[in-house]
Image (cartoon, rainbow, N blue to C red):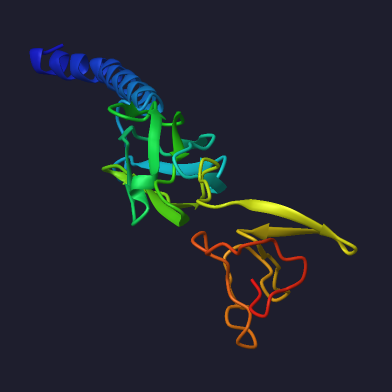
Amino acid sequence: MSDEAEGRSSFWTSVPGVLAGVAAIITAVGALLGTLAATGAIHFGPAARASLETAASIQSFGSVQVGQGSPASVVTVSNRGKAAAAVAATLEGAGAGDFAIAVSTCANVSLPANMSCQLQLTFAPRSQGDKAVTLRITADNADLPPPLLFTGTGSPTSASSLPSTLSVATDANGNQVEYNGHPLYTYSKDTAPGPTNGEGFLGKWFVATPTLQGQSAPQLTPTPYGY
């Protein structure tokens, strides 16, 4: 056989082995890529993002005395996405000074996918009245949850004192509470603390104030100008 014929024969004999080797390499590369994708080392398609969700144990703190603190509301932040997120929490609104993030495991950490962290929000009103604040969770490269609204009411402290005297007078109709000798009554249309619909009623009935001047003697019957 000529050298040329032997060369052709040797080439075609080696082709199946070369193809088998190439196929083995392709199979190995495919398996490696699949493993890397499954472990999150590489991604196909759009870049992976975090997806954050929130849940709070309390959003309405109710009535809390001025200067006192409430039980904490536990806010859980969960990452349901496929990438880690650096979470930040901020309080916004006019009542921000009456609320505080007391404890947080979310601060200065990168929250991995399928993990959660928690923060504790407390309410300590500085003055009387209704208060509200918004908790906003932010992070880069993440789908963000809606803000959470928290509310509470500052109520008078039990340490508040009256400058004058409360007393009780008794007659045939029972006991009558008086302040500085003035009988005190409630007005049927004032159904909750705060309203003063009876002020000036019939020009004779007025709201009793802490500075109401005293009478010389307790009154067992309504005065011409009741309170």
Q: In the displayed structure, would residue 183 be above or below residue 162?
A: below
Task: Determine if residue 156 is in view.
Answer: yes
Q: Quadrant of the C terminus?
A: bottom right
* Front in this rendered view, residue 164 or 67: 164
* Front in this rendered view, residue 191 or 18: 191
Residue beneath the point at 60% across and 59% down: 180
Q: Quadrant of the N terminus?
A: top left
Image coordinates of residue 72 in percent, x first then y, are 51, 34
Furthest toward the front, the residue is: 216
Furthest toward the right, the residue is: 172
Task: Determine if residue 147 is in view.
Answer: no
Q: In the displayed structure, would residue 101 be above or below residue 221?
A: above
* Quadrant of res 205: bottom right
Image coordinates of residue 199 in percent, x first then y, are 58, 78
Furthest toward the bottom, the residue is: 202
Q: In the displayed structure, would residue 105 be above or below residue 130?
A: above
Residue beneath the point at 43% across and 46% down: 125
* Front in this rendered view, residue 149 or 63: 63
Image coordinates of residue 126 in percent, x first then y, are 39, 46
In-image side of 45 versus 77 (left or right):
left
Image coordinates of residue 214 in percent, x first then y, are 56, 62
* Front in this rendered view, residue 221 or 8: 221
- Count of all numbered marks drawn on residues in the image: 0
Furthest toward the left, the residue is: 3
